[in-house]
Image (tube, rainbow, N blue to C red):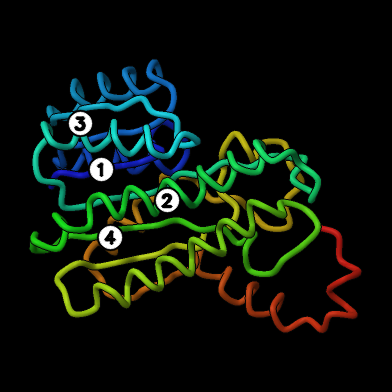
């Protein structure tokens, strides 16, 4: 396997890098911080004897990010799997951010994923067993007064992956989309959560177990499917009183 992971240096992205390296995959890792990437790459090379290349690129600058990743991929070799555990959110995302702040969220959660997928899709279509995996959020299940732009971006991402799955339905490419509940990361640390946070490692292991399966969308952990259904079914007169 030769795998591209965008958003590789922390959380689910780092866990995916570790699990895939354990299974012998060669990795092209993308994140914004070169020092974090270099440390992770050195660790994976030493521990698992796999090829690891890195690209330090800011997803907020979409065109430049796509160009840098594409250039690195050209020398890395044919990539058969692409994972997008990338995203950015802000605590003040409550409907009144400045345009550049909104752009940063939209670019990191949506635009860069669409742009990179467009860049790699032609080559993925030529490879047997190729796959594209996206990661959404339970925050997008229903609009609410916090994480306004983030939730909109993740809902857009879900729609995009549904379109992508339809586009590739008659090809060999498998398209998967995971809607994640609470994950134990720096963003969730210290927060009062309604339900337990799962480890990034457990998410990564489940994703790799499901490699190549044609199921479209799946909630992780699975019980979030029931919670999401309940939230969607709440009457507006009840839902509007909730603060979460």
Residue annotated with mark 3:
72
Label 3 secondary element = helix
Residue under numbered circle 4: 209
Q: Secondary structure at mark 2?
A: helix
Number of residues whose C-alpha sits closer than 10 Å to that of mark 3, classed few (under 14), some (14–19) or many (20 or more): some
Q: Position of residue 30 (x, y in %)?
A: 34, 33
Residue 234, position as x, y percentages in the image? 78, 81
Q: Which residue is mark 2?
A: 202
Q: Where, by quadrant of the figure, is residue 33 drawn?
A: top left
Tell me how far mark 4 sits from mark 1, CA to CA.
17 Å
Is label 2 or label 1 in front?
1
Q: Residue at x 60, y 50 (%)?
A: 197
Q: What residue is shown with label 1?
A: 4
Q: Residues within 10 Å of mark 4 (few under 14, many from 20)?
A: few
The quadrant in which residue 19 appears is top left
Query: Disc 1 on helix, strand or loop?
Result: strand
Q: Residues within 10 Å of mark 1 (few under 14, many from 20)?
A: many
């Amino acid at each position: 396997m030769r795998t591209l992971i965008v958003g590789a240096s922390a959380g689910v992205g780092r866990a995916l890098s570790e699990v895939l390296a354990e299974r012998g995959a060669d990795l092209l890792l993308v994140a914004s911080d070169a020092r974090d990437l270099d440390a992770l790459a050195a660790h994976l090379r030493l521990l698992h004897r796999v090829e690891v290349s890195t690209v330090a690129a800011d997803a907020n600058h979409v065109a430049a990010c796509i160009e840098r990743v594409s250039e690195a991929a050209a020398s890395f070799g044919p990539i058969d799997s692409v994972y997008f555990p990338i995203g950015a959110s802000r605590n003040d995302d409550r409907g009144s951010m400045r345009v550049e702040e909104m752009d940063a969220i939209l670019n990191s959660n949506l635009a860069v994923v669409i742009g990179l997928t467009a860049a790699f899709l032609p080559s993925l279509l030529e490879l047997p067993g190729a796959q594209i995996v996206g990661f959404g959020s339970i925050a997008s299940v229903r609009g609410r007064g916090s994480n306004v732009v983030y939730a909109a971006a993740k809902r857009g991402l879900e729609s995009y992956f549904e379109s992508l799955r339809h586009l590739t339905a008659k090809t060999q490419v498998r398209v998967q989309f995971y809607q994640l509940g609470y994950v134990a990361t720096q963003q969730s640390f210290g927060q009062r959560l309604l339900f337990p946070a799962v480890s990034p490692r457990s998410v990564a292991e489940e994703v790799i177990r499901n490699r190549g399966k044609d199921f479209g969308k799946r909630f992780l952990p699975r019980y979030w499917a029931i919670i999401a259904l309940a939230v969607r079914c709440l009457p507006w007169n009840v839902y509007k009183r909730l603060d979460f």
